[in-house]
């Protein structure tokens, strides 16, 4: 029995109870939803919180002085505090009254999702931080939402006569992890900012961001794209010592159009998003609080064990099928390997079947997976692949059924 199988056995009771809480999953027993990295399904608690808010309190925030409006304003403050706590920011509520008024310097800003969050940091903050000759390091093979905003900032600065250098944050090809040895060579006096990703949306690896801090030292701000990690594994801003954490509500079991930027606000200028934001996404914030409450109670450490074990089961099964190639770290394909376990995301190709067709066939068998170029920066649109991404409602039986179907498509 592998460590993964042991986890699946010991967590089975916990998982069964939580799976029951997803109405869309329970209502569709013939389907296996395997696309949580694209968007996550919602537990009943989140749907109920939305319904309760809209049927008992619904009002605009920060505008009226009647009870519903005041309650909505308070719910937004509560959501900010929930985000900070969920990310391990123990400092924010320094006065300890839990009302969401910041006691410490850190802040939580609501955005429509990771893409908008990263873009806002790039345009409204990074452009005020950098001066002529500065250098930044950003990932060139992660999600394009974590590359294009930094290149846009470079263009905006160039238009003002400020020239900065953008270096690719180096990868180690063998492990698909950031290469901290190569990074050491690149970091210097002028290094002013690093953008990184917590969990890779194609390869599923945890990119060990704490090691970046060890290389760049205490001065350089680090921005973390946590779109694929919030709700999937424990994330602690104290341990990671990053300066921004950005994530999307819809991938963390809350609603589309919601998301958050957590800003430490101790390195560089304070993050003050510009523009006029108008009416905030009140329902999105309410759903986010409910989703983070639910995920905290479910326990991200257990969610990680469960989803890593499911991904290992799938990877191990695919390794035995000659017609398939799993993308990403090959070392972790060895059964006994402890390196770079996949965090619930496995991406693969069939040597003889186009990925679109494979996705279509799998859908016909009830497996809902992603099949395209996966918005990876630098990747050719035609270079398709199939991505299976699991969450805690998925089961070993679903993975075994999927492997059966994949095996039946093997020509060798
Ligand atoms: N970063 C990563 C790592 C992602 O996986 C995604 C979504 N696939 C994004 C950013 C963009 O998220 P959103 O579309 O919710 O803005």
Image (cartoon, helix red, strand yellow):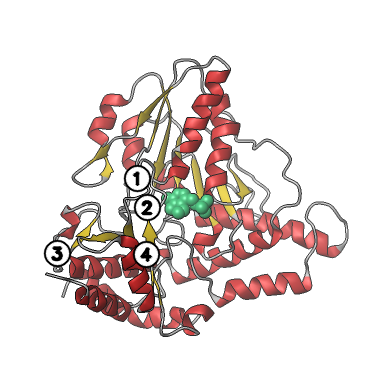
> In 3D space, how far apart are the residues under numbered discs 2 and 1 (Cα atoms)?
7 Å
Residue under circle 3?
335
Pointer 2 with pointer 1, Cβ within 8 A:
yes
Question: Please, what secondary structure does the residue beneath circle 1 have?
Answer: loop
Q: To which quarter of the image does residue 82 belong?
A: bottom right
- Tell me the crowding category of disc 1: few under 14, some 14 to 19, or many 20 or more residues within 10 angstroms, Cα based: few
* Mark with earlier residue (2, 4): 2
- Picture coordinates of residue 72, whole percent (x, y): 76, 60
Q: Which mark is residue 121?
A: none
Foreground residue among 294 and 182: 182
Q: Which mark is residue 380?
A: 1
> In 3D space, how far apart are the residues under numbered discs 3 and 1 (Cα atoms)?
31 Å
Question: Please, what secondary structure does the residue beneath circle 3 have?
Answer: loop
Q: Quadrant of the C terminus?
A: bottom left
- Tell me the crowding category of disc 3: few under 14, some 14 to 19, or many 20 or more residues within 10 angstroms, Cα based: few
Residue under circle 4?
389
Q: Residue at x 64, y 60 (%)?
A: 284
Query: Does 50 sit above or below residue 194?
Result: below
Pointer 3 with pointer 4, Cβ within 8 A:
no
- Picture coordinates of residue 242, whole percent (x, y): 44, 41
Pointer 3 with pointer 1, Cβ within 8 A:
no
- Tell me the crowding category of disc 4: few under 14, some 14 to 19, or many 20 or more residues within 10 angstroms, Cα based: many
Q: Nearer the viewer, mark 4 or mark 1?
A: 1
Q: Residue at x 54, y 63 (%)?
A: 292
> In 3D space, how far apart are the residues under numbered discs 4 and 1 (Cα atoms)?
21 Å
Q: Nearer the viewer, mark 3 or mark 4?
A: 4
């Amino acid at each position: 029995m592998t460590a993964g199988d042991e986890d699946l056995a010991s967590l089975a009771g916990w998982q069964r109870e939580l799976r029951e809480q997803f109405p869309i999953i329970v209502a569709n027993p013939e389907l296996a939803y395997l696309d949580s990295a694209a968007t996550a399904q919602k537990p009943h608690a989140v749907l109920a919180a939305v319904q309760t808010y809209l049927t008992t309190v619904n009002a605009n925030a920060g505008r009226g002085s009647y009870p519903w409006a005041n309650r909505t304003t308070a719910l937004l403050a509560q959501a900010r505090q929930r985000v900070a706590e969920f990310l391990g920011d123990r400092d924010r509520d320094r006065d300890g009254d839990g009302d969401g008024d910041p006691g410490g310097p850190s802040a939580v800003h609501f955005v429509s999702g990771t893409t908008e969050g990263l873009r806002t940091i790039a345009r409204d903050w990074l452009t005020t931080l950098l001066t002529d000759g500065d250098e930044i390091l950003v990932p060139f093979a992660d999600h394009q939402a974590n590359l294009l905003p930094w290149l846009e900032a470079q263009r905006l600065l160039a238009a003002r006569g400020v020239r900065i250098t953008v270096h690719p944050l180096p990868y180690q090809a063998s492990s698909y992890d950031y290469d901290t040895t190569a990074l050491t060579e690149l970091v210097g006096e002028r290094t002013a900012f690093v953008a990184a990703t917590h969990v890779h949306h194609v390869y599923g690896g945890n990119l060990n961001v704490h090691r970046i801090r060890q290389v760049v030292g205490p001065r350089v701000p680090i921005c973390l794209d946590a779109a694929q990690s919030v709700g999937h594994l424990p994330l602690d801003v104290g341990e990671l010592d990053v300066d921004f954490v950005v994530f999307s509500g819809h991938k963390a079991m809350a609603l589309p159009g919601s998301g958050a930027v957590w800003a430490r606000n101790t390195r560089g200028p304070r993050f003050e998003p510009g523009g006029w934001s108008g009416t905030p996404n009140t329902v999105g914030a309410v759903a986010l609080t409910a989703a983070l409450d639910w995920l905290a109670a479910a326990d991200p450490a257990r969610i990680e064990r469960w989803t890593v074990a499911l991904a290992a089961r799938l990877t191990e099964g695919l390794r035995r099928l000659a017609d398939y190639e799993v993308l990403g770290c090959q070392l972790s394909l060895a059964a006994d390997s402890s390196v770079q376990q996949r965090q619930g995301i496995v991406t693969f190709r069939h040597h003889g079947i186009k990925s679109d067709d494979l996705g279509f066939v799998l859908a016909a068998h009830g497996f809902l997976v992603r099949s395209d170029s996966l918005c990876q920066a630098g990747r050719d649109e035609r270079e398709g692949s199939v991505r299976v991404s699991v969450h805690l409602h998925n089961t070993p039986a679903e993975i075994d059924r999927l492997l059966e179907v994949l095996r039946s498509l093997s020509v060798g």
